[in-house]
Image (cartoon, rainbow, N blue to C red):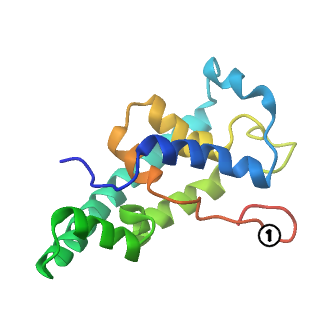
Amino acid sequence: MALLTLFPTENGIARLLAQPGDIVPRSSGQERLKEYVAPAHLRELFAGYRNDLRLAGDVAAAWWEGTIEAQEDLGLSRDEALKEAFDTRLAGPAAHPNVVWVVRSYWLLCSDTDPNSAAFGLAYPEDILLQWLIDAGETELVRLIACMPYWPIGLDENGNWC
């Protein structure tokens, strides 16, 4: 069964792929990623993320369905229950702590800011955590991530993601 969301997935994708560039400017060379072959360590990182996100997503989907059903039990229609659930939890199913933990953990793992690192500049975290899911055809995982109104991450006083 498809994950129940209130907002178009395409809007979430566009928002999340653009947001980090508002904080840390991105190079205009992102077109190169279309022919880019990721190094083995980034492919392994993505495989771990994909697996962990699937597990977290299964838990979150069941929790989210229960959240909507609880609103229906209060007498709301399915559409009203979905809207109320989103009003209470802005990120919908992506508000589940397991999903937030997976996204934050992997963002930090793939956000190497050391210019001398082999990973630096090869792919931005938002590419690995969202665009690569899109490219892999992970429709339900993309729908899950696209529910986030923003990435659950910030910058510390030294300009590092935290």
User: What residue is rendered at 46% in x and 38% in y?
Assistant: 133
Nearest to the observer: residue 144 or residue 162: 144
Corner quadrant of residue 122: top right
Describe the element under mark 1 as helix, strand or loop. loop
137 in relation to 44, above or below = above
Corner quadrant of residue 27: top right
Corner quadrant of residue 37: top right
21 in relation to 105, above or below = above
Q: Which residue is mark 1?
A: 156
- Quick one: label 1, few (<14), some, or many (20+) residues within 10 Å? few
Nearest to the observer: residue 113 or residue 84: 84
Q: Amino acid at mark 1?
A: Asp
Nearest to the observer: residue 116 or residue 87: 87
35 in relation to 112, above or below = above
Q: Is residue 76 left or right of residue 34?
A: left
Expressed as whole percent of the image width and height from the top left, the position of residue 131 reads 54, 36
Counting every numbered tag in the picture gives 1
Q: Residue furthest top?
A: 35
User: What residue is rendered at 32% in x and 71% in y?
Assistant: 85
User: What residue is rendered at 36% in x and 60% in y?
Assistant: 56
Task: For residue 111, say whether it is visible.
Answer: no
Q: Is residue 117 left or right of residue 68?
A: right
Q: Quadrant of the C terminus?
A: bottom right
Expressed as whole percent of the image width and height from the top left, the position of residue 49 reads 47, 49
Expressed as whole percent of the image width and height from the top left, the position of residue 76 reads 17, 74
Task: For residue 95, say whether it is visible.
Answer: yes
